[in-house]
Image (tube, rainbow, N blue to C red):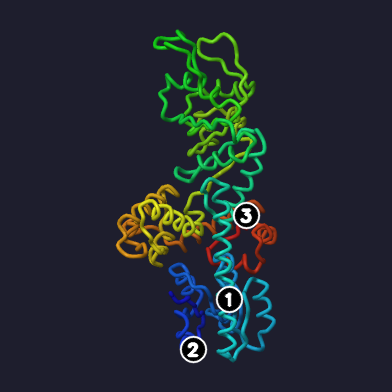
Amino acid sequence: MEQERILIVEDETSMAKQLKWGLSDDYVVDIAADAGAANAYLNEHHPSVVLLDLGLPPFPDGAEEGLRLLDEIVREKRHLKVIVITGNTDRDTAVQAIALGAYDFHLKPVVLGELKIIIKRAIYLSKLERQVAEYQCMARETLFQGMIATTRPMMQLFELAQKVARTDFPVLIQGESGTGKERLALAIHNLSARYEEPFVIVDCGSIPENLIESELFGHEKGSFTGAHARQIGKIERARGGTLVLDEIGELPLPMQVKLLRFLQESTVERIGGKEPIRVDTRVIAISNINLKQAVEESRFREDLFYRLNVVPLVVPPLKDRSDDIPHLANHFLRVYGQEIGRRLKGFHPAAIDAMLCYHWPGNVRELQNRIRRAVVVAEGTHIESADLDLATQIAGRRTLKQARDAAEAAVIKEALARRNYNITKAAQELDVSRPTLHDLLKKHGIVIPD
């Protein structure tokens, strides 16, 4: 069985070595002497427990740097347990650390036997939380057509999708290619009262412009050259159910007018037809381009945009939900392993690290295809990073820490701008203390304008 990993964050070399010596029989133990080294380590490895001394450079005589690092770890590493190592005179600081999210604290001088008990409990809880998250993933997988997620943005998206599924309002789903927009549309249909009725998808970008009207609205026999028989349009075929207009941004402007009329009146008129036909169909529009920007560039009708944008759903790219990557990867490993009859045990840690560092331009679809390939080419019992063919792709890209830092800085700047650079109000919006926000401003080099 693979040993659990522990990181000791301690600037006193003798203390760090003593702890490592006492714990190395049971765990893989590594040492970081300051917050920078700790962050670099945590971006490369996935320990179960961090033993954290709060007195770290550049303020070794205080707890400021240690508490800042603790806050960052707790916010970014959901199942990682932090045990604070502190002196008897710092009991109040230890209590403050618990309030910030530390799992427990242990007073110096360290009693190794007692510390091992705390570590053992922390690892047990971390494993339990990961198992619960995995079970939640499995439960949501059935509900949302295989869309596996544990991250907060995806949970919020699923909750909103459940709410909108109970209505007949039009829905606009936006997001990058490969993020799972069609799956989300199917989930909304299956969760709605229309689940037993037709689910019809029209790819607006693949139909020639001269055929799109006939495809959507249908035509009568003899209405134009080649119309040898009546054809029912896709809107009518979706009667009682759901019509999905994929890549709606590619719909020609004249068809946008006709679609708007259908949404307003719930009637269609076939080419060559004489009477409008009433059709009860729920419309879900999908786009991988920014439709609001398309409106500003006069490529998409503003009235149609607002008619569709009653309940906007935005599916985040995979790089913005990196905590979901291991869950998705394991799911695809099980699926494709069973498909070809291979019983692979999982991923080598280096393979997990490679997946977390990659930027995934093709999103979930790319992850799915890379793991399908890896299942075929892997020679051992575990998927190696080379099996995923990511090494050359990662070269020259941002590290996970760089990406997170950039995202963190962007969120802080946006909050400050919304609050007119009022530190107190911005800190409240970001759900951090004023001192923490000041530390973050210093960390990212953000200057408050006079």
Q: Which residue is mark 2?
A: 22
Graded by Cα atoms within 10 Å as few (under 14), some (14 to 19) or many (20 or more), the crowding at tag 3 reads many
Q: Residue at x 63, y 39 (%)?
A: 165
Q: Can see residue 59?
A: no
Graded by Cα atoms within 10 Å as few (under 14), some (14 to 19) or many (20 or more), the crowding at tag 1 reads many
Q: Residue at x 67, y 39 (%)?
A: 166
Give the secondary structure at mark 1: helix
The picture places residue 67, in percent across and down from the top left corner, at 60, 74
Q: Residue at x 50, y 13 (%)?
A: 271
Q: Amino acid at mark 3?
A: Ala
Q: Which residue is mark 3?
A: 415
What is the number of the mark on residue 122?
Answer: 1
How far apart in space, not on screen, are marks 3 and 2 (Cα)? 45 Å
Circles 3 and 2, Cβ within 8 Å, touching? The answer is no
- State the residue in front, 90 or 417: 90
Graded by Cα atoms within 10 Å as few (under 14), some (14 to 19) or many (20 or more), the crowding at tag 2 reads some
Q: Amino acid at mark 2?
A: Gly
Badge 1 or badge 2: first in the primary sequence: 2
How far apart in space, not on screen, are marks 1 and 2 (Cα)? 17 Å
Give the secondary structure at mark 2: helix
Badge 1 or badge 3: first in the primary sequence: 1
The picture places residue 374, in percent across and down from the top left corner, at 34, 56
Q: Can see residue 408?
A: yes
Of circles 1 and 3, the one toward us is: 1
